[in-house]
Amino acid sequence: MLRAISITIWRFRRELVLSLIISMIAIPFANYLVIERDRNRNEMYGEAFWIYGFEVYEMNDHELAAALPPEWGYNDDLHVLPDYLGNITYEYPVFGLIFFAIATWLFPGQGGLQPLWLNFILTLVFNLNLVLIAILLGDRIFKSQWARFFFTGYYVYGLIMSAGGGKLEPIVDCLFLMSLVLLQDKQYGKAMFALGLSVQTKIYSVVALPIIFLAAPVSIIWFLGSTLLTIVPFLFLGADFSSLLNHFLNTSAYSSFIVNPMYPGLFTSTPIVENGTIIGSYFWPPALIPLLIYVGFMLFTIRLYLPNREAFRNASLFGKIRLLQPFYIYMLPAVLFVFRWEMPWYLFWLGPAIFLFEKDEHRVGYLKELTIVGFLYAFGVVVNWPYFIAGPLPDFFIHFPFGWYTLLGIIGLIFSVGAAFGIWKWTFNRRERKAFIVREARARGELVM
């Protein structure tokens, strides 16, 4: 895998230079224009880890901010979750906590340049993810429209998550994509171990576990071995994952608010919000429209992912399960309708699962499905507008302290990126022209100094 990464970095060195330049430009813009609450919170917990160890899992944000030295400045309301999530303790798995603990240890001192440092590390990881995706796509990145569409979509998503948001997703995806590269090379044990670390950063990459297990059942030992990183802190070092469990089990104990506009539960219990507090609920039949559209879409497209009836009938039990793999992967985005708490960027969590398909026609259909789900998410906000304008949307918009003036910053960012692209293109075109002239001169037998 390291050899493949090295070759791919050299192959796309020019594009990676441009990507790094764009990332470096985006980091200070985003840090100024957006309150990156998740990054700030992880920064606080990373610093606190060296004082309290895994006991930080027993503290909610406000308790921890009050417990840390006042001169560190964590009581500024920018490093904690909103009040309606005030009872949530730290919910990210252990590997995510350790990542931020090491990052803050390497560059200690809250505030100042430390937030930019965290985004910088995540940006480097994001660019490594681009390399891993290029490995998985191979020559299709030049030949197939779906491959270029996916790469472009991931680039925008990954840049927002790393340079623009300082979130954990680049780390999760990096380990997930490493697992898929190793799976492609039939190194099943290493693939399982990398997947285990990914799941212990954020759990959504667990969707690949059944596929790798079917390819090599014994390799599950490596996945279980990696989970000792979580089991040991849980059993012996005071780690408490109750908030993560409440999130995963979809209970209102995580949040009384519902922020997933595709959640069918809005049909029977759309919250009534007054002054940021939920005082009741009501029936709202339009909430089912996104689900009904999705079901209709699936009924028209699912046939492509079902096995041939004759082949399925004649296959062994294990063979039947293998034949149902495309169906399983295609059904994964349906889970996005299940959870109450579903932020917009969650829609691309399942994007890398596209590499679990073996046929390009399946991948094209999967991209279409993810696109439809994205439209349904936006449409869900519209059909549930009375609720979302009363609660979730105003809370989301407070992350942009300059309001509509944020658009001016985005315009400035786009202009800066355009200028960087122009300089990059001129520089490399000049080098190519110079190299071409030198090659021609040497071909004519001229001495080139």
Image (cartoon, grey):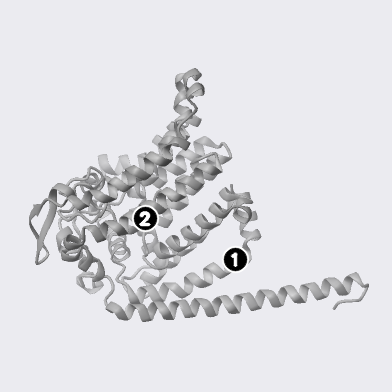
Give the residue at mark 1.
Answer: 15
Q: Label 1 vs label 2: CA separation?
A: 28 Å
Residue pictured at 17% horizontal, 60% vertical = 387
Report which quarter residue 248 is drawn in.
top left
Q: Which mark is residue 244?
A: none
Q: Secondary structure at mark 2?
A: helix
Name the kind of residue labelled 1 in the image: Glu
Q: Secondary structure at mark 1?
A: helix
Residue 357 vs 52, above or below: the answer is above
Between 106 and 22, which is closer to the camera in this rendering? 22
From the image, state whether disc 1 or disc 2 is nearer to you: 2
Residue 83 position in % (x across, y down): 15, 63
Task: Tell which residue pokes out farthest to the right in this image.
Answer: 445
Report which quarter residue 199 is drawn in.
top left
Residue 24 position in % (x across, y down): 48, 72
Report which quarter residue 261 is drawn in.
bottom left
Q: Which mark is residue 374?
A: 2
Residue 363 position in % (x across, y down): 50, 45
Please report whichever mark, 1 or 2, sits nearer to the chain's N-terminal start. Answer: 1
Between 145 and 58, which is closer to the camera in this rendering? 145
**Where the C terminus falls, by quadrant?**
bottom right
Residue 14 vs 331, above or below: the answer is below
Residue 174 can be seen, yes or no: yes
Name the kind of residue labelled 2 in the image: Gly
Residue 98 can be seen, yes or no: no
Residue 226 vs 213, above or below: the answer is below
Badge 1 crowding class, 10 Å Cα cut-off, few under 14, some 14 to 19, many 20 or more, is few
Residue 230 position in % (x across, y down): 32, 43
Badge 2 crowding class, 10 Å Cα cut-off, few under 14, some 14 to 19, many 20 or more, is some
- The answer to whether mark 1 and mark 2 are in CB contact below 8 A is no
| Left or right placement of residue 403 versus residue 117 in this view | left
Residue pictured at 82% horizontal, 74% vertical = 438
